[in-house]
Image: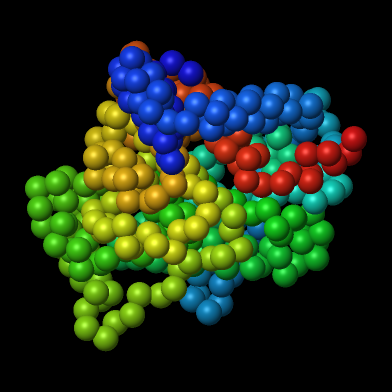
Amino acid sequence: MAEIFPVWTTRMVMAKPYLLALAKVQKMKFWNFLVYIILTGLTMQSAGQKAFSVGERTLLILDSSRSRPLKTELWYPTPETDSAGNRKRDLPFILGPTILDAVVQEGKHPLILLSHGTGGNRFGLAWLAFALAKQGFIVAAPDHWGNTYDNKILEYFVRSWERPMDLSFLLSYLLSRPEFARYIDDNNIGAAGFSLGGYSVLALAGAEIDYDLLKRNAKTKEGRKEFTIPEYGDLTKLIEKISFGNPGVAIPALYDPRINCFVAISPALGLGFNNSVQMEKIKCPVLIIGTGNDQIAPVATNARHYHDLIGGSRYYEFQGKAGHYVFLNMGDKGLQKEAGKYYSDDKTVNREKVHKEAMELIVPFLWEYLNREGQNAGK
């Protein structure tokens, strides 16, 4: 994994110069580092033991308490095959093949909740969902209503608390329905998200945003830059209208103790955090991934900033010219032309390679903290 240099103290950080990385490694306890390398190697080696076909289906769910429809995509391991491709989903992305409405592989599987970025949709991280399902995970990704590319409601671009609530409701829904619960290992649940979805999963982990701080920072030069987004434009005036932070207005509880580990990819809203006290409720493992050339959610105020505040978190930063949108799906030629702003990678950036390297970070992390009973399903 070129240009990713883990440094193991109590956290995983990135040092760009290789010699600096080695120097810092020498400061840690050698045996702790060696054990980590051995365990990670064994975990990755076990990955090749079983690769499943991937089933896919769409759920139409309604959270009536908030009047929020949650169209959700499920990806999951299946024993079925579809060599003719008669049951595949046609999307403008370059993805592995899935089998629509296939049966689920028998056994209990870990569940990963997946949260898309602002103005995206449930398919935005399909590359990650597919890769996880192929390894035996069930993945559930909702459309965050009002914050998708085809349903843009301006106020929901700043109602960030709705998204973690979506994920918690979805989890409760899946665990309450026997047709899903029979396949889910409810002791092994994770959450992953990109951009605003990255913040969303950190909120579920226990991160408590300070909306008053967010409003103040939105008025700064950096804040105006971060909150003027390609998906909708300037959000700073709308942020000012958020009632949370005002006297007597309580922020809803977002922490969900049912989730065991979290992956935040290029997380946003870091400007709402400035104190580790806001992270005191986070007790579960957190992996944060950023890109050094992120112009949408710069790592200094977001990914790296979160890592500095969250004790025990692991952090990887892709160097070079990989930007914020490198973590979106690879698109076909038509999509690249239609949505060019999301596919304007520098010529030195190989998006497919970035996705592969990200998976080499994410999968061992999940295996380390989720006891994957489903890994042996069907053997």
The outermost residue toward the right is: 379
Instruction: Specify how the rendered protein is coloured.
Output: rainbow
Residue 244 position, x and y percent, is: 28, 74
Image position of 18 with respect to 230: above or below: above
Q: Nearer the viewer, residue 279 or 9?
A: 9
Residue 40: in sight, yes or no?
Answer: no
Circle count: 0
Q: Nearer the viewer, residue 37 or 348?
A: 37
Give the residue at x 69% y 43%.
137
Q: Is residue 297 left or right of residue 55?
A: left
Residue 253 position, x and y percent, is: 44, 73
Q: Is residue 40 left or right of residue 264?
A: right
Residue 48: in sight, yes or no?
Answer: yes
The image quadrant of residue 184 is bottom right
The image quadrant of residue 162 is bottom left
Give the residue at x 54% y 43%.
123
The image quadrant of residue 2 is top left
Residue 112 position, x and y percent, is: 61, 49
Image position of 218 with respect to 244: above or below: above
Give the residue at x 71% y 35%.
135
Give the residue at x 9% y 48%.
221
Q: Is residue 305 left or right of residue 225?
A: right
Tell me the quarter of the image containing the C terminus: top right
Residue 142 position, x and y percent, is: 55, 55
Image position of 262 with respect to 182: above or below: above
